[in-house]
Amino acid sequence: MFWRNYMERIRLWLWLTLANGISSSKISSLLEIFDSIEDIYKAKKTDYEKIPKISAKDADILSNKSLKRAEEVIDECRSKGIRILTMESPYYPENLMHIFDPPYVLYVRCKEKLNLNECICITVVGTRRPTDYGVLVTGELSEELGKEGFTIVSGMARGIDSIALSAALSAGAKVVAVLGCGVDVVYPPENKNLMNAIIENGIVMSEYPPKTPPFKENFPQRNRILSALSMATLITEAPVRSGALITSSSAFEQNREVYAVPGNITSKESRGCNVLIRELGAKAVIDAESIIVDFRDCYADVLRKNKPIIKERTDNKTQFVSYNEKYKDLSEKERLIMMTMSPVPIHIDTIIEKTNLSAEELTSELTMLEIAGMVKSHPGMMFSLNI
């Protein structure tokens, strides 16, 4: 009986959130008048028209009680392994419940259930066009925070977002990608492998139903979820007009901590971070400890519980066989290169130093590995595994 009633309420929540033009803030207005989703659904047009924020057009839309679209979305989610969370679910993130315009429905893809209410999340965002400096500090900070037990949240965009998520995954940490499209849509398309890795080791979530394209207007709206999920937001590199600053603005409004990495004062890509520190009160970050120290004492048990378990290999022969099995079709030089790399981008000079290959040899081999989809290039002659 409970399950049947719960599924019925999910249908009603989908009916409401899928209604054209009925935003989260309008739903909040409805809930101030009506006690439950059932009451909202059963109400008449004249009841809706009495609510100040509900227009005549909205009242007409809400008067359509068809659940057909809701059923279609449920069927779509079932076929694609997408979970639907409402605020009634124990897995719905509590941090989202008390913001001004919470997402009343979340669509989630994950291999194993991850309860974000038992995690300390840090959102890491920044420019889509990072410099070498931005790539380096984002990778290092995300990896170190992940190793300490923080769950890394980001948006899976090109640049800083993807680097942060990849670095955290390489540390064995849990990660969350919040999308501005449906969770069955890979955007940008080159992040297909990254998205699959996140589904295996964390959560891909969105407030938008399956098949929703990455419309430009979705991303500023999505940013409030990015900041609200976490105890703090870290901006590692961003110009003054970066979308990352919208996320930081949301974080300030939601009374979350905001951190920023200071950058070269002549660099446009760091201008946004420097302004956040100088004018808006963001805390300057010079290393991961700058953040960890603010959470270690209060959340020691939670962080300890979520620390990745690093399994040390004592049998080198087993490790070599396992490695060769994974890359059995590669040449010796290609295997050597792959052994030096991780999802965190590193500079080509570092790879040369580790492999003792000439620049000409390495460039040729990296080109072939990139064509094969095993290696990914980044601005500034940086390369990473294409997980």
Image (cartoon, rainbow, N blue to C red):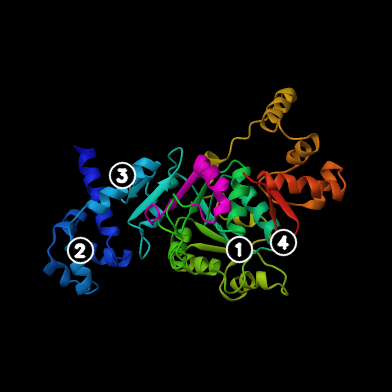
Mark-to-mark CA distance, 3 and 1: 35 Å
- Name the secondary structure under disc 3: helix
Compare marks 3 and 4 and give the one earlier in the sequence. 3
Looking at the picture, which amino acid does disc 1 mark? Answer: Arg
Q: Residue 354 in the image: x percent, y percent?
A: 82, 43
How many C-alpha atoms fall within 10 Å of the one at disc 1: few (<14), some, or many (≥20)?
A: some
Residue beneath the point at 71% across and 32% down = 329
Q: The magenta stretch spans which residues? A: 186-211
161 magenta-colored: no
Looking at the image, do the residues carrying marks 3 and 4 touch, with CB atoms under 8 Å apart? no
Could you tell me if residue 328 is visible in this image?
Answer: yes
Side of 219 where 313 appears, left or right:
right
The residue to which callout 3 is attached is 75
Looking at the picture, which amino acid does disc 2 mark? Answer: Leu
Q: Residue 171 in the image: x percent, y percent?
A: 63, 43
The residue to which callout 4 is attached is 133
Compare marks 3 and 2 and give the one earlier in the sequence. 2
Q: Viewer-proximal residue, 58 or 306?
A: 58
Looking at the picture, which amino acid does disc 3 mark? Answer: Asp
The residue to which callout 1 is attached is 128
Q: Is residue 16 above or below residue 314?
A: below
- Quadrant hosting residue 55: bottom left
